[in-house]
Image (tube, grey):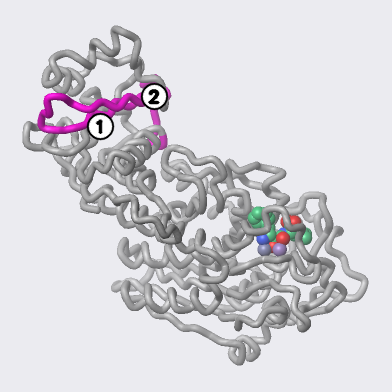
C-alpha cells in the first residue's frame, strides 16, 4: 500500500473513497463544511435527520451520485471531542480499512477534522495511527480459500490535514505506521497459518528469508547445537515430535555505536497438544497459534531493521512442537536446563516455560541491558485479564514504565501482575530445584516466577499474551483470527529504550 500525507484540495479529494471522521459535539467544522458543500448539503441534512450524529464507532456509507471527486463517502463517528485519543482515531481508520475492502475501493483519503486536535496528538502520532488503523483494518486472510472471489487489498491511502505544516510533520509517522502495521499483518499471517504448514522448519526458513530481505544476521541452530548449549528442557519438549526443533537467533546492529543491548525471546511452539498431559479436544485447533511470541519477535526484528533504533537487538526463537509421541517427555521427568538448574515435570502441558527457561538462562549470560520475553504462556492470564490485555511481570521498574508508556501510544493494553516471593512455595519440588507447574492458583504469576530463576540480575520483563494472540469476535482494526498483538508494542518500546 502507498501512503501519503497532504492538505485538503480539489486534487487531494480525487480518490475512490473519502472518509470523514466527525466529532459528536463539533458539527461545525471547516472540513466537514467543505465536503458538505460538494454534496449540496447532504451531510448536514443527515445530521438534522438524526441519521448520523458522530457517536463513537458510528458509520454511514454513501455512494456519491452523480459521482464527484470521490465515488464513496464514509462518515465516521469520533465521539465526544474531550474523550478523543489516538486509539479512537486508529479505530475509525480501521473501519475505513474494512469498508475499503468490502467496497473494493483502491484509493482512500482520510480527512481529519479541521478543528484543532488535542495537543498530545502530534501530527506524527496522528499520521501513524491513521495508517496503522487503515492497514490493520483492511487485513484479510484468505490464502487458504480456494474460491476465485478473492478480496483485493487497497492500494493507496492519503491522510489529509488542515495545514501543510501538519502534513509534513505526519510523514515520518505515516511511514513508521506503514512499516509496523505491514509487519503486524505479516505476524497475523504467520500466527494464523495452520500447524501443518508452520512447522519449526518453516519458522526457521521464514527467519532466513526475512533476515536476507531486511539485512539482519541470522543463525539457525539445530538439535546438535541445542545439545551443545545443554538446553535439556527445550530438548525434552521437542522429543515427542517427529519435527526437529530449532533455536533461531537474529541480530540487528545499528550503524553507530549502540547505546544499549537488548535481547528478545519469543515462544515458538508450532502446535501445543499438551503432550502426555494431553489437552482436551475442545478448541485445541487454537494451539496452532502457540508460536505467536516467536512471530512477534520475528516481525519486530524486521520492523526495527527499517526503523533503525540505536540499539543492538538480538531475537531468540526456540521452536518445536509439543506432541505426545512414544519418545515424549513425561510427568515426573527431571530435566537439566542450560544454566544447570533442574526442573521436575508435573505437567507436560506447561512446556513454554521450559523453552524459555533454557533460552533466558543462556541470554542472561550475554549480560544484555534488557531482556524481554513474549509468550502465549498460561490460560491463567485469561482468567485474570480476559481477552483485553497482556500481563507484564518484571524485575525492572524501568522496563515496566517503558511498556506502560509504549502501550498508551500503540493502544495495546498491558497490566502489571506481581512476582511476590510467596509464589516460590508453589514450585517447591521434593526432588529437583523446582517444579514446572504450581497448579491453578495465580498460574500466570507462578509461571513467571519459574522464569525469574533463569534471568539472573539482568533487568527482565515477561509478557504473557495468551489472551491476546487470537481475536474471537473481530473489532475495528482487528479482524477475527490472529491479532498480531505485540508487534507495535515491542517496536515502540525498542524505539524509546
Ligand atoms: N499454550 C498454553 C497456554 C495457552 C492457553 C495459550 C490458552 C493460549 C490460550 C500453555 O502451554 C499451557 O498449556 N499452559 C498451561 C499450564 C498449566 C498446565 C500449568 C495452562 O495454562 O493451562
Ligand atoms: Mn501447553
Ligand atoms: Zn503452550
Asked if 5 appears above or below 229 in the picture, the reply is above
The percent position of residue 142, horizontal first and vertical second, equals 41, 55
Quadrant position of ligand 1 = bottom right
Q: Quadrant of residue 304?
A: bottom left
Please give the label number shown on residue 348: none
* In-image side of 307 versus 337 (left or right): left
The outermost residue toward the front is: 147
Mark earlier in primary sequence (1, 2): 1
Q: Quadrant of residue 253?
A: bottom left
* In-image side of 294 versus 115 (left or right): right
Q: Quadrant of residue 451?
A: bottom right
Asked if 421 appears above or below 247 in the picture, the reply is above
Q: What residue is shown with label 1?
A: 19
> Is residue 68 rendered magenta in the image?
yes
Label 2 beta carbon less than 8 Å to ligand 1: no
* In-image side of 77 versus 233 (left or right): left
- Relative to the observer, which residue lies in front, 283 or 1? 283
> Is residue 362 rendered magenta in the image?
no
Q: Residue at x 36, y 42 (%)?
A: 133
Q: Residues within 10 Å of mark 1 (few under 14, many from 20)?
A: many
Asked if 292 appears above or below 233 in the picture, the reply is above
The percent position of residue 273, horizontal first and vertical second, equals 70, 66
- Relative to the observer, which residue lies in front, 233 or 124? 233
Q: What residue is shown with label 2?
A: 58
Q: Is residue 114 visible to us here? A: yes
Q: Residues within 10 Å of mark 2 (few under 14, many from 20)?
A: some
Q: Which residues are magenta?
A: 59-87
- Relative to the observer, which residue lies in front, 269 or 261? 269
Q: Residue at x 65, y 42 (%)?
A: 385
The percent position of residue 173, horizontal first and vertical second, equals 27, 48
Q: Residue at x 58, y 74 (%)?
A: 319
The percent position of residue 481, horizontal first and vertical second, equals 51, 50
Amino acid at each position: 500500500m502507498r501512503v501519503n500525507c497532504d492538505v485538503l484540495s480539489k486534487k487531494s479529494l480525487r480518490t475512490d473513497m473519502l472518509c470523514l471522521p466527525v466529532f459528536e459535539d463539533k458539527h461545525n467544522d471547516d472540513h466537514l463544511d467543505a465536503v458538505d458543500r460538494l454534496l449540496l448539503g447532504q451531510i448536514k441534512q443527515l445530521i438534522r435527520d438524526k441519521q448520523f450524529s458522530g457517536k463513537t464507532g458510528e458509520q454511514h456509507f454513501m455512494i456519491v451520485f452523480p459521482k464527484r471527486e470521490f465515488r464513496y463517502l464514509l462518515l465516521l463517528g469520533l465521539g465526544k471531542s474531550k474523550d478523543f485519543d489516538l486509539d479512537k482515531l486508529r479505530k475509525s481508520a480501521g473501519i475505513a480499512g474494512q469498508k475499503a475492502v468490502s467496497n473494493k475501493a483502491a484509493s482512500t483519503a482520510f480527512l481529519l477534522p479541521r478543528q484543532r486536535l488535542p495537543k498530545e496528538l502530534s501530527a506524527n502520532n496522528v499520521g501513524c495511527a491513521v495508517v496503522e488503523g487503515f492497514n490493520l483494518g483492511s487485513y484479510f486472510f484468505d490464502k487458504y480459500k480456494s474460491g476465485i472471489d478473492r478480496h483485493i487489498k487497497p492500494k493507496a491511502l492519503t491522510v489529509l490535514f488542515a495545514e501543510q505544516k501538519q502534513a509534513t510533520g505526519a510523514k515520518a509517522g505515516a511511514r513508521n505506521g506503514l512499516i509496523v502495521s505491514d509487519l503486524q499483518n505479516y505476524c497475523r499471517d504467520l500466527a494464523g497459518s495452520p500447524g501443518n504448514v508452520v512447522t519449526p522448519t518453516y519458522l526457521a526458513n521464514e527467519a532466513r528469508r526475512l533476515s536476507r530481505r531486511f539485512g539482519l544476521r541470522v543463525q539457525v541452530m539445530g538439535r546438535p547445537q541445542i545439545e551443545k548449549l545443554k538446553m535439556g528442557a527445550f530438548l525434552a519438549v521437542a522429543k515427542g515430535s517427529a519435527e526437529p526443533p530449532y533455536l533461531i537467533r537474529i541480530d540487528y546492529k545499528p550503524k553507530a555505536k549502540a547505546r544499549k543491548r537488548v535481547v528478545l525471546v519469543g515462544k515458538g511452539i508450532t502446535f501445543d497438544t499438551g503432550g502426555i498431559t494431553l489437552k482436551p479436544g475442545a478448541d485445541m485447533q487454537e494451539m496452532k497459534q502457540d508460536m505467536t511470541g516467536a512471530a512477534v519477535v520475528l516481525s519486530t526484528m524486521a520492523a526495527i531493521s527499517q526503523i533503525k533504533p540505536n540499539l543492538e537487538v538480538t531475537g531468540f526463537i526456540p521452536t518445536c512442537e509439543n506432541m505426545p509421541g512414544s519418545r515424549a517427555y513425561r510427568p515426573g521427568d527431571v530435566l537439566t536446563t542450560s544454566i544447570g538448574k533442574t526442573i521436575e515435570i508435573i505437567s507436560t502441558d506447561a512446556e513454554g516455560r521450559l523453552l524459555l527457561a533454557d533460552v533466558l538462562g543462556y541470554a542472561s549470560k550475554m549480560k544484555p541491558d534488557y531482556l524481554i520475553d513474549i509468550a502465549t504462556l498460561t490460560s491463567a492470564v485469561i482468567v485474570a485479564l480476559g481477552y483485553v490485555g497482556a500481563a507484564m511481570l518484571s524485575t525492572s521498574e524501568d522496563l515496566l514504565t517503558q511498556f506502560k508508556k509504549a502501550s498508551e501510544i500503540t493502544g495495546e493494553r498491558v497490566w502489571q501482575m506481581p512476582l511476590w516471593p510467596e509464589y516460590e512455595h508453589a514450585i517447591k519440588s521434593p526432588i529437583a530445584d523446582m517444579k514446572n507447574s504450581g497448579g491453578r492458583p495465580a498460574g500466570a504469576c507462578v509461571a513467571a516466577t519459574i522464569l525469574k530463576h533463569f534471568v539472573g540480575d539482568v533487568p527482565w520483563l515477561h509478557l504473557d499474551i495468551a489472551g491476546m494472540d487470537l481475536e474471537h469476535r473481530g473489532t475495528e482494526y482487528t479482524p477475527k483470527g490472529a491479532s498480531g498483538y505485540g508487534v507495535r508494542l515491542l517496536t515502540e518500546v525498542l524505539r524509546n529504550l
